[in-house]
Amino acid sequence: MQDEKYILVDSEESLANLLADLELYEMAAVDTEADSMYHYTTRLCLIQITIGEHHYIVDPLCGLDLAPLFKARAMQTLIFHGADYDLRLLWQTYGFSPKQIFDTMLAAKILGEDHLGLADLVREYFGDELKKENQRADWTTRPLPLEMCEYAIHDTFYLHELCAILVEKLQEAGRMSWLTEQCDALIEHAKHPAPQRKDPWRVTGSAPLSPCALNVLKFLWEWRENQAQELDRPPYKVMPVELMLAIARRSEANFPTVDLEKLPKLPRNFRDERLDSFVNMLQTAVAVPQSDWPERLPKAPPPPVVPNSDLLSVLKTWRDLKAEELELDPSLLANKAQLIWLAAPGDMPWEARYEEAHLMNWQRALWTEILQQNLPNAKRVGDPD
């Protein structure tokens, strides 16, 4: 692909031109860029929009009122590639949610494509290579460098044509309704933030730690959060999780003393006030009475339902065979958690099992087909009528 011209929207005039253009079209291809790799709080930094022959780069950081943008005609039906993060970002930032979307990544998955990345699909269908140089760029950089803008528009440049190709293939396969249902669910899902973890300081890898080490880890995590906020940096750039775990383990070995010489090597910028703050934090942590140390958690929370193991095995086999027949990833038909609900013990009706497993209508139709094909076998392993 040759570099294409783009229109930077960072003024009232350029925004007015974009709004007028959006009224001429039924749908727009959209992508976003955020700054989670460089700052503590994730901010929406760019909105890329392709309509017709025009490629717009909207600057949300320039102070423009973008409310009219989200009321425009073409913005009600959007094409994304991997829509989940973009939808969440747009909802959290502007309270905006489109009426309809077409997710090219989901479409490719439903069609059984081997590779789902945008670069892979562009290579397969258009024979072009997408640029990768700015994948880790700081999108808060202003003024926006030319090469970053050119990189940004590549994420929407092909989406209209790719959408048209995938729509035709979905219709031929009789799977268009599958995608529509999945996309509608994505839109709604993006409006609901993930529940906050009760103890976010219990990072991956902390489960085997003793209460003594967990206590230090908790103080480390809280200290890192405060430092990250003050520095406006992602927490992992203040101190990676691996180092936090190593410090917690070493602190237990040296308990109750705090000896920097016996700790793992600290980042080079740990000096002066930051180093003093770090040492004070550790001294406070080791002074906590043992009765107040956090407890170790059980290895794994109990499952919401204990499945009939024979039925689970059979359902998994049937699922895998059907997925192979349809040339699909088996998890599309039912993931592990959904299989467990489908294999729940007792005489729960299948419709109730579908509800508990949160199966979509197209998945239910496939499972009804699977059960009709295999029901005699199901009864032999305690399958409900």
Image (cartoon, helix red, strand yellow):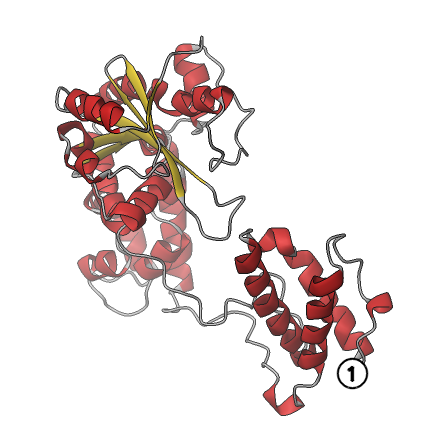
- In which quadrant of the rendered image does the C terminus lie? bottom left
Q: Is residue 55 left or right of residue 148?
A: left
Is residue 297 visible in the rendered image? The answer is yes
- In which quadrant of the rendered image does the N terminus lie? top left
Query: Residue 225, image x and y in percent?
Result: 55, 63
Q: Is residue 363 left or right of residue 32?
A: left
**130 or 106: nearer the viewer:** 130
Is residue 203 visible in the rendered image? The answer is no
Residue at the location (64% across, 77% down)?
Answer: 215
Residue at the location (73% across, 69% down)?
Answer: 276
**309 or 144: nearer the viewer:** 144
Query: Residue 328, image x and y in percent?
Result: 37, 34
Q: Is residue 59 left or right of residue 72?
A: right
Task: Identify whether 19 is placed above or below 269.
Answer: above
**277 or 317: nearer the viewer:** 277
Q: Is residue 207 left or right of residue 41?
A: right
Q: How many marks?
A: 1
Q: Secondary structure at mark 1?
A: loop
Query: Residue 145, image x and y in percent?
Result: 49, 24
Q: Residue beneath label 1, please?
A: 256
Residue at the location (42% across, 25% down)?
Answer: 152
Q: Residue furthest top?
A: 2
**249 or 28: nearer the viewer:** 28
Residue at the location (76% across, 58% down)?
Answer: 266
Query: Residue 254, image x and y in percent?
Result: 82, 77
Residue type, label 1: Pro
Task: Identify whether 340 is placed above or below 84.
Answer: below
Neighbor class of circle 1 (other Cα within 10 Å; few <14, some 14-19, many 20+) is: some
